[in-house]
Image: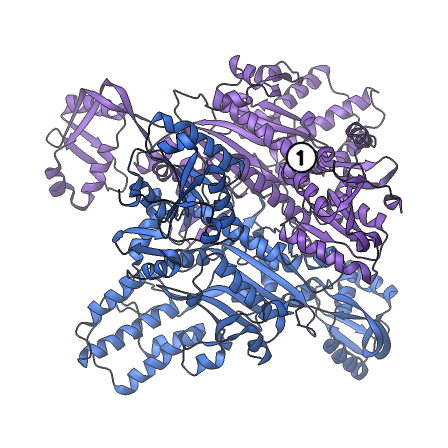
Chain colours: A blue, B purple
C-alpha cells in the first residue's frame, strides 16, 4: 500500500464514535474514575496505553517548547490560598450561572437551560408548521449523537409567532454572552422553568467553579484547588527574572493538574473536573513584541477565523501564512504569531490532522476576565470544533494586580542607552512623625502611601493643596487615616532617568492535554475497509504508547530463546515494547495491537532460529519486510525517533509476503 | 584530581545546612509557595533547576521500574469521593491527635507536645543536677540545628525525682505508639498544658489529615484530595488484570501528587502538605511470593535494621546480602527482597550516598492501618534518618474491603492443573418469588444474598433450619427483609473445581519524591576546601538539571559564531545546556554553575575559532581536557547517558591546563 492508498483506506469507512469509545475503554486507554462505586461524573482515569500516550505527549511538549526555547519550567502547588485567587479575579469571576428548583432541589446551568428550552420550542414550531415530521425523534437522535443528557424530555408541536421565533434565534446566537441577570430576565420573559414540572426556578446564582478546601487544622485558612497553573508562575515572576539575570523576554512553563468544578460535566474527556494543563507565560516588553525566530516560521500556512469573519456569520476560514497574518495585523504581533505557528507544529507532530485544525479569535464578550486578545487552536471532532489550546495576550493584568495587592514591585529594569527626562508625581514622608501617631499601624500607613499610583498621587496632591489634609482608608487600619502637609509632601518633579522600568506583558499559550489527546484519538481512528470490525489507531510512532509488538509465531519452545534475546536488545535500547506469546493466531494478535496503535510488529518464526532474521510489519499498510534483528531494530529506531520515513528506513530490508494478517 | 582526592575534598569541610539552603533558594531550586503573600507553611514551589531535577528523577524512576519491569502505569484522579476513602479506612484512621487551647484557640499536635514538654523537663532536671550548664541555651542550639519552632519557650531548672525521670524516659521511647486517649491520660497525669500560659488544653481529638472538598454544585457529594495514589490503582484492579490477560503477578504504578493536611508542618521539603509520590502496587499470589529475577539481585549488600535490633535498643545495622536476608527470613519473601534491592539501585543511580542509606523494618505499633509488614528505605540527613521509600506488604486488605463494600469480585482465576474437591456453602434463590414480594427492591435483595460470605451463609443456614426464616437488613431497602425456605435454600455442597480463585496480595514500594530529592541535595553538597565559600552540588550527570554550561571566554564578536554552532549541535542532540555569555570572569561563571550542579563546562576561546577545538571542564575535579567539538560532545553524551566513566570517556581528548577556575 502506498501512502495514498492508506489515506484512501483511512477515510473509506464512516467514523463511528460509539465504536471508537468501545475500543478506547476496551483497551483501557481510559475509564470513568470510581467506576466500582458508580462513578463520579467529570472524573476519568487513564489506563496503561492512555497513560503512556499522555506521558509521550508531555515529553514531546517539554522538548518542543521548554528545551527548544530555553524556557524556565516551574512546578507550583495546586493548593492556593483564597487571597491569591481573590486578587487574580477568580473568586469573583470564575463562575457559571446556576438555577435551583426550590421544590426538587435540582440544579440547572442557566445558559444551557435557556438554550435547550428555546431550541426545543423552535423544533416544536417546525413540527407544527409541518417542516419536520417528528421533532422529538429528531432531537433524540441529535442528543444521542452528541451524547448529551437532555433536560427537556418532550417537545410539543406548538406553532410560535414569527416574531417570537425570530427573537429566539437571536437569543441563541448570543447565548454565550449573557450575564446572570440577563439570563434571569430571559427566563422570566420567556417563561422558562423546570422543563419537566414547569415549576419556576430560583433566579440564576453565580456558582464558583473552584473546589474549596481548608488549609491547616484551624479551618481558618480558606484555599482552593488552582483553576490554572498560571498564577503560580506569576507569583514567582521576580525570582524567575532574577534567575534569567534580569533580562526579558523570557518564558516560564508549567505542566500539571488544574481543577474546575463543572455544574454538569458532559462530553467525555472534553469537559472534566480534573485535567492536565501545560501552560507557558512568555514575559515581554509591551513596546517590543517582535520575535527573533519569527523568520523561521513565517511561511507556515494556517486556517484563521478572525473576529470579523465570525461577526459576519461565516465559519469559512481564511487561509494564509502566519507571516501574512502578522503583516496585515490580523494577528497582533510577531510573538503571538510565533507561538501560533509553534502550536501548529506541535499539534501536527503528535498526530493532529491538520485539515481539522483552525485558529479562531475570541469574540470580545467571550474572553476570560484577564485577556486582552486570544486565539484558540480548535480541533474538529464529532462533538464539533473544540478549543484545545488558548493563546491569550494577558497584557500586564496579573502582575499588576498582584503587585498592587502585595505592594511588591514586579517590574523589569532596563538600562537606557540614552537617559531620558521624566516628570512625575513623587511623595515624601516625614517618617519620624508616623511612629508616634500611628504606633503599630505606622508601617501599613507608610506602605500604603508609597504604593500610590500616579493618578492617586495627583488626586491627593490636589486635596492636600485645597484642604491642607488628606483622609484615607488603609487596609487593616481601623478608622480614617488623616494626614496634613507636615506628614507628607506630594510634588511633581522632573528627573533624568538612566533606567527604564516596565511591567512586562504576558503571552500565554495554554494547552488542555486531555482534550488534545481525545482529538488525536478521533483523528487517528479508522476501520479497515476490507473488514470494518477491525479498528486501527494510526498514531505517529513517536507518540504511540508502545512501539513494538514482539510476536513469536507459536508457543513452540524453540522460539523462546530468540524472543528473549530480541526483548533484551529492545529493553537495552529503551524502545517500549510488548511481547504477545498468547496462543491466539498471529492475525488476531496484530488486530488487537492495531487497536492499541502500536506501529510495528516483529515476528519471530522458525527461520529466525536458523538465520537470525525477523519480520517487521507496519501497522497502517500491514506491509512486511525482513532482515537481521540489528537492521530491523535500526529501522524501528530511525522511523520512531529520527523522523525517517518508512521507505527510507527499511530500504536495506527485503519485502516479505505472508498471509498472517488474514489468518 | 583522582576519585580518591575528590572524595577527600568532598568531606573536608563540615556540612552546613544554612549554607546549602541559601544556595538552593538563591539558585531557585525551590522556594516557599506564595512567598509574595507571606507564604503558606508546608507548601513549596520548584524553580527551574529543582523542576528539571525532579523531572529527571521521575524519568529515571519510570525507566528503572515501569519500563524495565513492564509495569502498567495508570494516572488516576486526585479528587476522591468520601465513600472510597471511608472503605479504605482513611476517613477513620488517617489522622493525628490535636489539642486545642480553649482560651487562645492555639492548636497543638498532641504527641509532639508531650514529647517536647517531657524533654524540656528532663533538660531542666539535668541543669538542676548540675549536669549541663544552661539547659535553655542547649535546647535553643538543638532547635536551631533542627530548624524547629519550639512550643516550649523556657526550661526551668527543676530537679525531678529519679522515679519520675525514669518514667519520662520510658514515655519518650514509646512516644510514636500512643493512642489519643493515652496521650490525653499522659497530659493529665504529668500536668501538661499550654507550655506558655500553663492553661489546661482540651483532650486530644483526632484531626483527619485529608483535605476535604465538595464535588458538584449541590455540595452534597463530599470528597477528599487523595492521601496516596494507591487507591486509584486498587479500584482499577479488574481492568488491569484483564489488560494483563488475567495473569498474575503483575504490577501497576502511578506517579502523581498526593496531599496531607499536616497540623504544623516543619523541616522544609521533608514534611509538606502537597507532594509528588511514585507508587507501585505489585499484585501476587499469596501462596507464591517468589520472584523470577531475584537471582539477579541476590548478592547486593545492604544495611538492615530489623525489628528485633530496634527492640533491643540498638541502632547498629546488620549488613548482609539481600539473598541472605531472605534466606534467613529476616525479609519475608523474594518479591519483597527484590524490590528492596531495586529501590537501593534506583537511589544510588540518582545520587544517594549509599553509606547514608539503611532499610528499617517498621515496629508493629507504627505500621499504617493496612500494612502487614513494612521496610523503609531511610536516608540520613541533617534532620536525622528520614523515611524516603516505604516498602509495605498490604496483604489483601484493600482489594478485600473494596470488594465487600461494592459487592464486586476482585479475584484472580487460575486454571488448576489437577482439579480439586471443594466443600462450601451455597445459596439458591427462587427468583420468580422475589419480584412480586420486593418489587423495585428485588435486585438489591438478590445481590445482597448472593454476596454473602461463607461465614454469613453458615450462620443463616442455621437460622433457616431453626426458625424456617431469616431476617436481614439490606442496604437501601426500608425495614426488615424476611425470607423463608420457599425463597432461599442454603446448603453445604462438594464440587470438583478446575479453577482456583484468589484475592492477590500486594507489595507496595512507595516513593516520596520530594524527600528523596532533598536528601540527594544534602548528599551531593560540599564546599571546596581551598575556598569554603565555593559550593558544589555533585549530582550524577544523568540527574543534573543542566548537563553543559557553554562559556565563550569573552563577549568578543569573533566567538559568537562558534558558540551558536555548538548550541545548535547540543540542541539537536537534546542535551540540556545553558549559554553563559555574561560579562563576569570565567572563574565566577564556573563557580555559579557548580552551585547549579552542572557537570560539564565547554569553553570557547580564540583557538576555537582557528582549529575548532574546545575545552571540556569536569565540575568536581575542575579537570580540563581539549578536543574537537564532535569528540567533546561524544564524551559528554557517553558519560551522561551511557554510564561511561570520565577517564574512559575522555581518553581521546588531551589534558588542558588553564587558570580559569581561579580567575
> Dot 1: what SS?
loop
Q: Is the N terminus of chain A in the top left, top right, bottom left or bottom right quadrant? A: bottom left
Instruction: Report which quarter residue A168 is drawn in.
Output: bottom left
Answer with left or right where residue B428 lies relative to residue B236: left
In x, y percent, where is residue A580?
37, 36
Q: Nearer the viewer, residue A212 or B168?
A: A212
Q: Quadrant of the C terminus of chain A?
A: top left
Classify B546 as above or below B68.
Answer: below
Query: In which quarter of the view is residue B501 placed?
Result: top left
Give the percent coordinates (x, y) of residue B20: 76, 40
In the picture of the structure, the residue carrying the numbered disc 1 is B644
Which subunit holds the residue at mark 1?
B
The answer to which of A40 and A297 lies nearer the viewer is A297
Q: Nearer the viewer, residue B49 or B445?
A: B49
Question: In the rendered image, is residue A206 in sight?
Answer: no
**Residue in front for this viewpoint, A279 or B299:** B299
- Crowding near the residue tagged with mark 1, few <14, some 14–19, many ≥20 C-alpha atoms within 10 Å: some
x, y percentage for residue A623? 36, 49
Which x, y percent locates residue B195?
A: 70, 35
Q: Residue at x 87, y 68 (%)?
A: A430
Q: Is residue A130 visible?
A: yes
- Residue at the image point whose x is 86% and y is 46% from the top: B660
Amino acid at each position: 500500500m502506498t501512502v495514498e492508498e492508506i489515506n484512501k483506506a483511512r477515510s473509506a469507512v464512516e467514523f463511528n464514535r460509539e465504536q471508537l469509545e468501545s475500543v478506547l475503554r476496551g483497551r483501557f486507554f481510559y475509564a470513568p474514575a470510581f467506576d466500582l462505586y458508580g462513578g463520579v461524573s467529570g472524573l476519568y482515569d487513564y489506563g496503561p496505553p492512555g497513560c503512556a500516550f499522555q506521558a509521550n505527549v508531555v515529553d514531546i511538549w517539554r522538548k518542543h517548547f521548554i528545551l527548544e526555547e530555553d524556557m524556565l519550567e516551574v512546578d507550583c502547588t495546586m493548593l492556593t490560598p483564597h487571597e491569591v485567587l481573590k486578587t487574580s479575579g477568580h473568586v469573583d469571576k470564575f463562575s457559571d450561572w446556576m438555577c435551583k428548583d426550590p421544590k426538587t432541589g435540582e440544579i440547572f446551568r442557566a445558559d444551557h437551560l435557556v438554550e435547550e428550552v428555546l431550541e426545543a420550542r423552535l423544533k416544536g414550531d417546525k413540527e407544527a408548521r409541518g417542516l419536520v415530521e417528528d421533532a422529538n425523534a429528531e432531537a433524540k437522535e441529535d442528543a444521542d449523537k452528541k451524547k448529551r443528557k437532555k433536560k427537556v424530555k418532550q417537545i410539543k408541536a406548538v406553532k410560535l409567532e414569527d416574531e417570537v421565533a425570530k427573537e429566539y434565534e437571536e437569543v441563541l446566537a448570543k447565548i454565550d454572552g449573557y450575564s446572570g441577570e440577563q439570563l434571569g430576565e430571559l427566563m422570566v420573559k420567556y417563561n422558562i422553568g423546570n422543563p419537566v414540572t414547569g415549576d419556576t426556578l430560583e433566579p440564576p446564582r453565580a456558582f464558583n467553579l473552584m473546589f474549596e478546601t481548608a488549609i491547616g487544622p484551624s479551618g481558618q485558612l480558606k484555599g482552593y484547588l488552582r483553576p490554572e497553573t498560571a498564577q503560580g508562575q506569576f507569583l514567582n515572576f521576580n525570582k524567575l527574572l532574577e534567575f534569567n539575570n534580569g533580562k526579558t523576554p523570557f518564558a516560564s512553563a508549567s505542566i500539571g493538574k488544574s481543577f474546575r468544578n463543572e455544574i454538569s460535566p458532559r462530553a467525555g474527556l472534553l469537559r472534566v473536573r480534573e485535567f492536565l494543563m501545560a501552560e507557558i507565560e512568555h514575559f515581554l516588553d509591551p513596546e517590543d513584541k517582535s520575535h527573533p525566530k519569527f523568520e523561521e516560521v513565517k511561511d507556515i500556512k494556517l486556517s484563521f477565523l478572525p473576529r470579523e469573519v465570525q461577526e459576519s456569520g461565516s465559519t469559512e476560514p481564511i487561509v494564509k501564512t502566519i507571516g501574512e497574518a502578522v503583516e496585515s495585523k490580523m494577528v497582533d504581533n510577531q510573538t503571538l504569531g510565533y507561538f501560533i505557528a509553534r502550536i501548529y507544529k506541535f499539534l501536527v507532530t503528535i498526530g493532529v490532522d491538520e485539515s481539522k485544525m483552525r485558529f479562531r479569535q475570541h469574540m470580545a464578550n467571550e474572553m476570560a476576565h484577564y485577556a486582552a486578545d486570544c486565539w484558540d487552536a480548535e480541533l474538529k471532532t464529532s462533538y464539533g470544533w473544540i478549543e484545545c489550546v488558548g493563546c491569550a495576550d494577558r497584557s500586564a493584568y496579573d502582575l499588576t494586580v498582584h503587585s498592587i495587592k502585595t505592594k511588591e514591585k514586579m517590574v523589569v529594569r532596563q538600562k537606557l542607552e540614552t537617559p531620558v527626562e521624566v516628570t512625575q508625581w513623587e511623595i515624601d514622608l516625614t517618617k519620624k512623625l508616623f511612629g508616634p501617631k500611628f504606633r503599630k499601624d505606622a508601617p501599613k500607613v507608610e506602605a500604603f502611601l508609597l504604593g500610590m499610583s500616579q493618578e492617586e498621587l495627583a488626586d491627593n496632591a490636589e486635596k492636600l493643596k485645597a484642604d491642607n489634609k488628606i483622609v484615607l482608608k488603609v487596609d487593616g487600619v481601623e478608622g480614617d487615616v488623616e494626614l496634613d502637609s507636615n506628614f507628607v509632601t506630594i510634588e511633581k518633579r522632573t528627573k533624568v532617568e538612566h533606567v527604564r522600568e516596565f511591567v512586562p506583558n504576558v503571552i500565554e499559550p495554554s494547552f488542555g492535554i486531555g482534550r488534545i489527546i481525545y482529538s488525536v484519538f478521533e483523528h487517528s481512528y479508522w476501520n479497515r475497509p476490507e473488514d470494518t470490525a477491525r479498528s486501527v489507531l494510526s498514531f505517529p510512532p513517536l507518540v504511540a504508547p508502545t512501539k513494538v509488538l514482539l510476536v513469536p509465531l507459536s508457543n513452540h519452545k524453540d522460539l523462546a530463546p530468540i524472543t528473549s534475546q530480541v526483548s533484551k536488545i529492545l529493553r537495552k535500547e529503551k524502545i517500549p515494547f510488548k511481547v504477545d506469546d498468547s496462543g491466539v493466531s498471529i492475525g488476531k494478535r496484530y488486530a488487537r495491537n492495531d487497536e492499541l496503535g502500536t506501529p510495528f510488529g516483529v515476528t519471530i518464526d522458525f527461520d529466525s532460529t536458523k538465520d537470525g532474521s525477523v519480520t517487521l510489519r507496519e501497522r497502517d499498510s500491514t506491509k512486511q519486510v525482513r532482515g537481521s534483528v540489528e537492521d530491523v531494530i535500526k529501522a524501528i529506531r530511525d522511523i520512531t525517533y529520527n523522523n525517517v520515513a518508512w521507505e527510507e528506513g527499511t530500504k536495506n530490508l527485503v519485502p516479505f509476503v505472508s498471509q498472517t494478517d488474514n489468518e
